[in-house]
Amino acid sequence: MNDTDVRKGLAGVVADHTAISKVNPETNSLLYRGYPVQQLAAQLSFEEVALLLWTGELPSEAELEEFVQFERSHRALDPRVKQAIDLLPTDCHPMDVGRTAVSVIGANDPDSEDSSAETELLKAKKLFAAFPAVVAYDQRRRRGQDVVEPRDDLDYSQNFLWMTFGEEAAPEVVDAFRVSMVLYAEHSFNASTFTARVVTSTLADLHSAVTAAIGALKGPLHGGANEAVMHTFDEIGIRTDETRQQAAARAKTWMEEALAAKRRVMGFGHRVYKKGDSRVPTMKQALDAMIEHYGRHEILGLYDGLEQAMDEAKGIKPNLDYPAGPTYHLMGFDTEMFTPLFIASRITGWTAHVMEQRADNSLIRPLSAYSGPEERHL
């Protein structure tokens, strides 16, 4: 095999077919089952989008109602999962908690080894319903707070915020959160999704595939960028008493110095999008709504200053993590919880891919180009 045959990182390699999502280069739009994600985020609940990703079509009114009732009946934090979480230190990364929780959920699922299409969908729905309680409780326990029980009179996004903060969120906050969940739900053969498909291709169970995907998502080159954005904001310094213009000027100076020092600045650029991440404008609208709701215009200053400096120096545009990070910050989520929020959303896309891989499976086993010593003997 020649070196020219090797595609490091599988760059440009088409590994399989998928009907779940694609980026349309003509419109620079991310499509879920053919629908532009910005349209879905503007008009649909996250529950509707989940069903679309799993089944290929938008649900009827009756199908949606059935799923909503199912989801609301499976929200409570399983005592066995809580016990496992409580065994983990509060200074471990929340992604470790999410990974462990999915393993425990899978180990206790009586249908874990049943890979029939009907049962796989049932497991996906149950995991979708159960995971928000994991994220909510993990943030609360780190703050010395108790579990907040779910409410079946709230939709997915309302209840997620209720379980995390113990109070009903304002409609603007709920809507911004819903938008983020829709936008993070799916993105074709990204690193964690491909990991899930590789594991599924061995005929391992759904929970093993999702656990492996969480491991891939923990890496800062894939899922940690929304956290890194807030660490950047914190390093620059968030000053609530300064104007938007003052914050922008400080951020611009910081970015110029960081780039001169050849530092890697997370939240910018994407391997798929060449004209900018198509999800950013929708998420930026949600961020703007949060800035107005909380009266935090210095956050917008930091955002604008960094974006402008990066564009002027490198011509690199923000990706989805850039507006998502400060949006979650304004809602009150601890920075380390941002990537677990990504899990809660991406469970939909991962499990859709698990089911698609299972339906037409072939073991994923690429070749390698050997670069070690030639054959030798003792």
Image (spheres, rainbow, N blue to C red):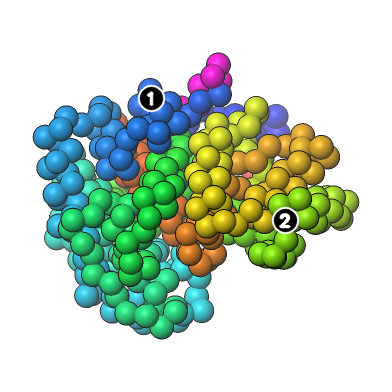
- Quadrant containing the N terminus is top right
Is there any visible trace of residue 14 in the rendered image? Answer: yes
Q: Position of residue 232 (x, y in %)?
A: 69, 59
Measure how far apart labels 2 and 1 are at the Cα level: 39 Å
- Label 2 sits on residue: 243
The answer to whether residue 116 is left or right of residue 38 is: left
Vertical position of residue 172 compared to residue 36: above or below: below
Is there any visible trace of residue 185 in the rendered image? Answer: no
Residue 304 found in image quarter: top right
The label on residue 194 is none
Q: Amino acid at mark 1?
A: Tyr
Please identify, in this view, whether the residue under mark 2 or under mark 1 is nearer the observer: 2
- Quadrant containing the C terminus is bottom right
Local SS, label 2: loop
For image coordinates 25% across by 27% down, the residue present is: 57
Is 338 part of what is drawn in magenta? no
Vertical position of residue 93 compared to residue 214: above or below: below
Foreground residue among 304 and 139: 304
Is 26 part of what is drawn in magenta? yes
Q: Amino acid at mark 2?
A: Thr
How many residues crowd mark 1 within 10 Å: few (<14), some (14–19), many (20+)? some
Please provide the residue range marked out in magenta: 22-27
- Label 1 sits on residue: 35
